[in-house]
Image (cartoon, rainbow, N blue to C red):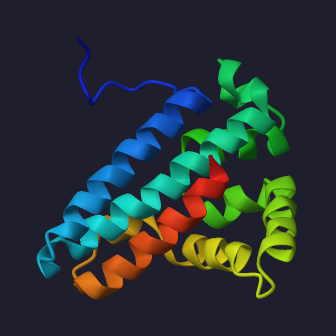
Amino acid sequence: MGSIFARMRLTPGQLRTVAERRFADAESLRKTGENARANAAMYLAGFVIECLLKARLLEKYSWLQSVRNAGQLPKNERRLYDLCYRMHDLAEILDSLPDLKQRLMNLDRNRWQTGHLFPMLHSIVGRWTIFARYSTQMATMAEAGDFVHQIKEVKEWLK
């Protein structure tokens, strides 16, 4: 069996599996009710969205799965490669998926008169960052519960 630390490229399906596992981890931490676990619950929940957006990116730009020498890619393709394999900027990834943005806005119009799905995703990608893992600030479990709940609602539409 390989190491959990092994570097590997994942398929969209594998990224979705990882997303489900990390969401379960975030929920487990949230269910402890301990404020000391709030940051980790929020970090893992946001990571779920990163995995799901990257799965979408790989599906939309399937050539990303077979790139062997990223240094030879044209600038615009290199940016997509970096978003998928080297960066964690959810807002930039979402900007590279205009069809997803449109789909979610259409769902908002058709399902909810208030249009909350896309604004919720937009809020999540605007707030979450990998730097949360280094934060000395402490979130409360109430904040974590709200954030995890938002992730749960949005992730169903990103699968």
Residue 35 locus on image (x, y percent): 15, 81
Q: Residue 137: in sight, yes or no? A: no
Residue 32 locus on image (x, y percent): 14, 69
Residue 59 locus on image (x, y percent): 74, 34
Q: In terms of image quadrants, where is residue 20?
A: top left
Taking the image as shown, residue 61 lies to the left or right of residue 86, namely: right
Residue 110 locus on image (x, y percent): 86, 71
Toward the viewer: 62 or 115? 115
Q: Is residue 11 above or below residue 120?
A: above
Taking the image as shown, residue 139 lies to the left or right of residue 17, namely: left
Residue sitting at x 78%, y 64%:
104
The quarter in which the N terminus is drawn is: top left
Q: Is residue 3 above or below residue 77?
A: above
Residue sitting at x 72%, y 73%:
118
Residue sitting at x 71%, y 60%:
94
Taking the image as shown, residue 33 lies to the left or right of residue 15, namely: left
Taking the image as shown, residue 131 lies to the left or right of residue 150, namely: left
Q: Residue 37: in sight, yes or no? A: yes
Toward the viewer: 82 or 44? 44
Residue sitting at x 62%, y 40%:
55
Q: Is residue 90 above or below residue 159?
A: below
Q: Is residue 144 above or below residue 18?
A: below
Q: Please count the marks in the image.
A: 0
